[in-house]
Amino acid sequence: MAIISAQKTPARPAPLSDTTVIGWLRINLFSSWINVILTVVSLYIIFVAVKGIWVWGIQDAVWSAETRRECFKISKDGACWAGVLNWMDSIFYGRYPREELWRINIGGLLLVLWMAPLWLPRVKGKVFIGLTTVFLYPFLAGYFFSGGEKGIFMQIMISAAIVCLAANTLHSALGVFANSSLSEFLIRVTGTGKASEKTQRNMLIGLLALALVAVFLWQMSWHLESVTWTKWGGLFLTLVISGIGIASALPGGIILALGRRSKLPVIKVISTTFIELFRSVPLITVLFMATTMFPLFMPDGFVLNKLVQVIIAVCLFNACYMAEVVRAGLQAIPKGQAEGAHTIGLGYWGTMGLIIMPQALKVMIPNIVGSFIGILKDTTLVSIIGLFDILGMLRAISEDVFWRGLHHEPLLFGAGLFFIICFVMSKYSRHLEAKLSTDHKD
């Protein structure tokens, strides 16, 4: 038998790993002559653009001046950021009284404190915390922002908001440091651990009622000076309108989407008509209709200010667009999921709430967050109907006597501010996708 010995072929040099910087550059930017040319041209364009922005916006810019004319005397070719800096309070707070700005700051800090547990991994009951944020925080923040006299209903809702905020904070602290919940802590402290569930539930309800009464009596002495809505403006007003719109868009969209998929003809027709009516006209038309025709449908003596009318219009408009996003997510779920839920005895609401809707919302996270970003940006349209949101305040800088004609710098600052907010929302959307394992690839 002939023995054939295989000759060893000369070893080829191993390809450069794409994990190194040089390998990544060669594969992605210099893999062919066409890519080399495109890369060089692109880098040249980026260099020219960045250099121009750096020279105009940083190197030759004026940061301290009293008027636009003084900016020109210091530098004719650079940006005049002094006007933006002098108007910074108005850009963020509008015409809100300067001695009362602490109320807006406190309202923002309360929102951060309220929502912080949603990002803590060891905290339980996040759904309840989110619901209290949506339905109770607006009453507490609304009183801080507007002030004035409190009716009995407003006092009850403020008391409930304060109790929920304190309970959420204590519950979160116990979850982080003791891996426990507030109810478990109260049961352990009161010594009712061996009692029946009914006794424990009654004890917790009694403590809640006692806390509500104590807080109600405490807040009765509160009195904040009234600040009319016409003083609201700037980024503060933009966040108020867009925040309420975002908070109401998803629940409203879910209700409308379920109504459109309903087997009851009346509910289906009403939901479909409502959705198509609002989706067939631009937002600016809806805003004009809300501020001019909405009062005509109200009873005599019932008056809503323009801000409330705008918020209602924004909520309804975005709920209709969100309904189509949710409906698309529902249609993406296989019918076998609903059939499997019915086989284990779940009804319509149990199937929809526990099986179908969580999967649909998880699949549609990019679309939902994209709609939220659209709500934030579309809110600037309220400047057309006379509300001085952030866009209105940025435009007002160019009409100031001392800064007349200053257009580019304020609008660029506003664009940068919107980019930061939208970029953070987008990154959080990607974080949710990865956390919930939606299997979306880059």
Image (cartoon, rainbow, N blue to C red):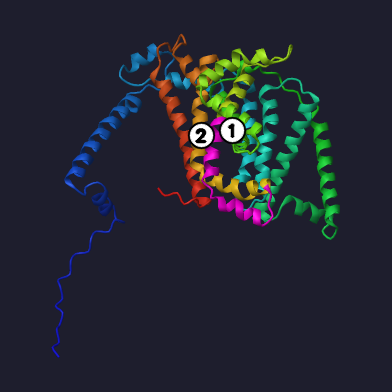
Classed neighbour count for the residue bearing mark 1: other residues with Cα under 10 Å, few (<14), some (14–19), many (≥20): many
Q: Residue furthest top?
A: 401
Up the image or down, 106 lies above or below 190; here it is above
Say whether residue 403 is left or right of residue 303: left
Name the spot of residue 130 as percent of width and height, x first: 65, 41
Name the spot of residue 117 as percent of width and height, x first: 63, 45
Q: Quadrant of the N terminus?
A: bottom left
Up the image or down, 353 lies above or below 416; here it is below
Dominant secondary structure of the magenta stretch? helix
Give me the residue at 57% from left, 33% from top: 246
Between 379 and 166, the residue placed more toward the observer is 379
Q: Residue furthest front?
A: 265
Between 355 and 407, the residue placed more toward the observer is 355
Q: Secondary structure at mark 2?
A: helix
How far is the residue under mark 1 from the one under mark 2? 9 Å
The image quarter in which residue 231 lies:
top right
Name the spot of residue 430 as percent of width and height, x first: 47, 45
Say whether residue 38 is left or right of residue 238: left
- The answer to which of marks 1 and 2 sits earlier in the sequence is 1
Give me the residue at 46% from left, 30% from top: 418
Pointer 1 residue: 249
Pointer 2 residue: 371
Q: Secondary structure at mark 1?
A: helix
Say whether residue 231 is left or right of residue 442: right
Indicate whether residue 338 is drawn in magenta: yes
Q: Amino acid at mark 2?
A: Ser
Tag 1–tag 2 contact (CB < 8 Å): yes
Q: Which residues are magenta?
A: 320-347
